[in-house]
Amino acid sequence: MSVIINGLSFLYGEKTVLKNIDLRVSDGEKVGIAGESGGGKSTFLKLVSGLYEVKSGEITAAGERDSAGRRKNVAMVMQNAGLFPASIRENITCGHEMSDKIIFDACGAACLTEWINTLPDGLETFVGERGGKVSGGQAQRIAIARAIAKDAPVILLDEPTSALDDDTTGAIIAALRKLTEFKTVLHVSHRRETLVGCDRILILKNGELFEC
């Protein structure tokens, strides 16, 4: 099993967000989770990714149970790309040593190469505060290239196309296909129709996870 979750519960203050969730995800399986906005989907992914500490229950991702270990084994693409005020290259590498080939291959898979080749500074182009110097679609593709370059066995997707216009969405979907190929995927969305290609779809409602 690539992801194993036992008895996961989570509270914000006194509000219960997740209740006693159990889940098994096989290697290479793609699982969609649908639920209303504000229903705990993003919190669930942040717990799996190790961004939030597990207080009740257990999560194992690619054999790692502690938060630091899970962070190494997971790559996450969220609704808002969350770029750093740095260059395109630095946003892809996140400070890790990485060959140019890995970076260029990731850019190609994320449909970025043609645009980067038009920039005077190429990969060294500064993206601005919170990615303010690039479009939403470009920022999201940089985030996808970051995830591709990391080459983690588990991919977490948090509504990665919901904030984009129709003209941009097609390119993002193509990049996401490259990212998720042969990977284990947890994809959350408030719209079930965006979970096309998942092996199974679950429902998160009132903090509990149900089979569809």
Image: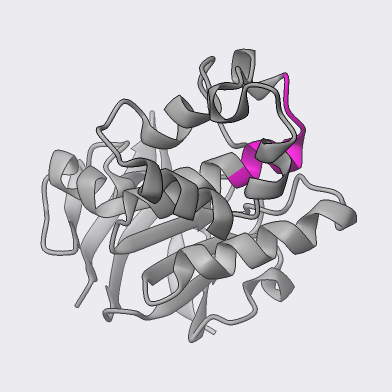
Residue depicted at 70% across the width and 54% down the height: 161
Q: Is residue 122 visible?
A: yes
Residue 136 is a magenta residue: yes
| Residue 46 at x, y percent in the picture | 38, 44
55 in relation to 5, above or below: above
Q: Which residue is more in the foreground, 13 or 55?
A: 55
| Residue 122 at x, y percent in the picture | 61, 29
Q: Is residue 76 visible?
A: no
Q: Which residue is more in the foreground, 99 or 199?
A: 99
68 in relation to 109, above or below: above
Residue depicted at 57% across the width and 63% down the height: 176
| Residue 111 at x, y percent in the picture | 65, 55
Q: Quadrant of the C terminus?
A: bottom right
Residue 201 is a magenta residue: no
Q: Which residue is more in the foreground, 186 or 153?
A: 153
Q: Which residue is more in the foreground, 15 or 203?
A: 203
In the drawing, does residue 107 fall left or right of residue 183? Answer: right
Magenta: main secondary structure equals helix
90 in relation to 101, above or below: above
- Which image quadrant for residue 27? bottom left
The span shown in magenta is 133-141
Numbered-mark total:
0
Residue depicted at 43% across the width and 69% down the height: 209
